[in-house]
Amino acid sequence: QVQLVESGGGLVQAGGSLRLSCAASGRAFSSLVMNWFRQAPGKEREFVAIISRGGSSTDYEDSVKGRFTISRDNAKNTVYLQMNSLKPEDTAVYYCAGGWDNGLGITRRSPHYLDYWGQGTQVTVSS
């Protein structure tokens, strides 16, 4: 069993930066493909970024490309999301989620196919 705990959210002005962290318990972290999703009020949960087990491959949702960077430190059982040039439309609850590779690499997965989720951390970007 893997437990995920996010931190680092908060209130920031447009153009600012935040770094989210997601700490995992258990020994399986390095075997998981890790994701960040977000959910704004009244909207469905949407994919933000994904990173391979070793950290060498990543993919991003188009609206965050060039502004957000996902990374991981398997020695620390932690995945990060560095968010720069934040916009009001980035306001959401951000969730980290882990899933088994199953040969899919960084192929994007529906949230329904991800096994482990954190509780979420609120990011609010003011204009």
Image: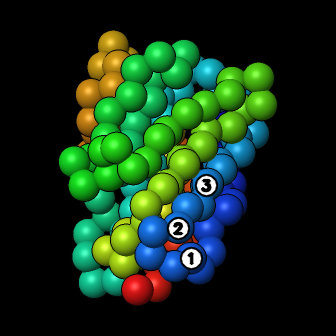
Secondary structure of the residue carrying numbered label 2: loop
Q: Label 1 vs label 2: CA separation? A: 6 Å
Q: Position of residue 37 (x, y in %)?
A: 40, 55
Which of the 4 image quarters holds residue 29?
Answer: top right
Disc 3 versus disc 2: nearer the observer: 2
Q: Which residue in the structure is indicated by mark 2?
A: 16
Q: Position of residue 11 (x, y in %)?
A: 59, 80
Q: Which residue in the structure is indicated by mark 1?
A: 12
Secondary structure of the residue carrying numbered label 3: strand
The residue drawn where x is 43% and y is 61% is 85
Viewer can see residue 93: no
Left or right position of 92 against 21: left
The residue drawn where x is 60% and y is 43% is 80
Q: Give the farthest residue toward the left.
A: 62
Secondary structure of the residue carrying numbered label 1: strand
Q: Is residue 37 above or below residue 65?
A: below
Q: Which residue in the structure is indicated by mark 3?
A: 20
Q: Give the farthest residue toward the front.
A: 15
Give the number of the disc on residue 93: none
Q: Label 3 vs label 1: CA separation? A: 13 Å
Q: Nearer the viewer, residue 123 or 23?
A: 123
Q: Nearer the viewer, residue 17 or 89?
A: 17
The residue drawn where x is 37% and y is 71% is 87
Do residues under tags 3 and 1 come within 8 Å of each other at their CB atoms?
A: no
